[in-house]
Amino acid sequence: MILLTGGSGRLGSALRALLPEVAAPGRAELDVTLPEQIERALDTVQPKAVVHTAAYTNVAKAETERGLCWAVNVEGTRNLVRALGPRGLPLIHISTDYVFYGDTGRYREEDPVGPVRNYYALSKLVAEELVRILPKHLVIRTSFRERPWPYPSAYTDLYTSQDYLDRIAPDVALAVSHFDQIPFTTLHIATERKSAYDLAKETRPDVRPASRTESPVALPEDISLEVSRWQALKEEMKGA
Ligand SMILES: NC(=O)c1ccc[n+]([C@@H]2O[C@H](COP(=O)([O-])OP(=O)(O)OC[C@H]3O[C@@H](n4cnc5c(N)ncnc54)[C@H](OP(=O)(O)O)[C@@H]3O)[C@@H](O)[C@H]2O)c1
């Protein structure tokens, strides 16, 4: 059995549907900011691993709701790490491309992270480093959008390897299912580099071209991830 945090979220809901044996208590039962609820969930579910998708994810609002963002993303992750360490359980942690600065793009798993562009990214970067304290962990950096493109405009000057959730979630589920066979502690799960506008046009042909400079929060110009490690692993997993 796998214990999933954030099962009502976008990625969490998709993973619930894709993973065969998963327990996903809602936030009312498993609030990651409350250590006693984490202990209770671990005692009840007795999982073989935890997949941590729960997060404060509103990038723009995080600039003004810093306390809440930090409490969920950093303290919540720290609470999980503290609970899993003594139990010897692995943590599969969902992270973001935003841990990179985002000027050169094509970031590899081992490239230096930061400096980050916004507060959400800072909280996710600190969370990653907390997860690395655990002997058994996997940090999955990804990025996804709902289908169809959920906004009226899309940036022509922001390059990304994000993709639609229905392409990303099955890959994350595949990695979770084969966690024991993954000989790395960081994995980029995304697709080819393209502009956000090109991705948007695929599902919303009338999307308005826009510039990332219109965003109220600082955004990178090229946050694309190098995904060859995952592509090779995926071929191996599918062939096995
Ligand atoms: N969306 C993206 O493009 C993107 C890109 C890169 C990385 N990520 C990462 O992928 C993961 C999933 O993102 P998402 O877009 O699917 O998120 P989402 O739709 O915003 O869902 C977030 C989930 O976290 C839960 N949550 C929030 N605070 C919590 C708490 N204190 N305790 C327990 N659960 C809590 C929410 O529960 P409620 O429903 O009760 O609020 C919800 O289930 C996150 O770690 C995010 O940082 C997302």
Image: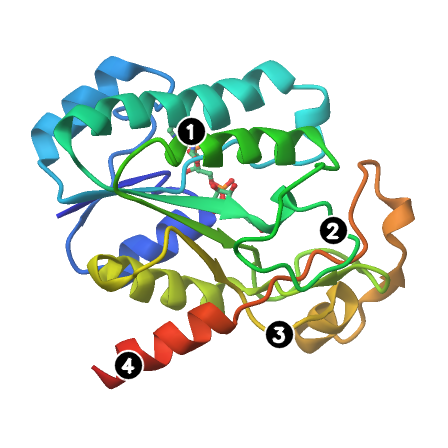
* Image location of residue 164, percent across then percent down: 55, 66
Q: Are marks 1 and 4 in contact (CB under 8 Å)?
A: no
Specify few, some or many for label 3: CA neighbours under 10 Å numbering under 14, 14-19, or 20 or more: some
* Image location of residue 12, percent across then percent down: 38, 48
Q: Give the residue type at disc 3.
A: Glu
Q: Which mark is residue 192?
A: 3
Task: Say which element carries label 1.
Answer: helix
Estimate the spatial distance between the alpha carbons at disc 1 and disc 4, rounded to whole Å.
31 Å
Q: Residue at x 50, y 52 (%)?
A: 141
Q: Which residue is mark 2?
A: 102
Mark 2 residue CB less than 8 A from any atom of ligand 1: no
Estimate the spatial distance between the alpha carbons at disc 1 and disc 2, rounded to whole Å.
22 Å
* Image location of residue 109, percent across then percent down: 52, 56
Estimate the spatial distance between the alpha carbons at disc 2 and disc 4, rounded to whole Å.
31 Å
Q: Which residue is mark 1?
A: 130
Discs 2/3, front: 2
Specify few, some or many for label 4: CA neighbours under 10 Å numbering under 14, 14-19, or 20 or more: few
Say which label, 2 or 4, has the lower sequence index.
2
Q: Are marks 3 and 4 in contact (CB under 8 Å)?
A: no
Say which label, 3 or 4, has the lower sequence index.
3
Could you tell me which quadrant the C terminus lies in?
bottom left
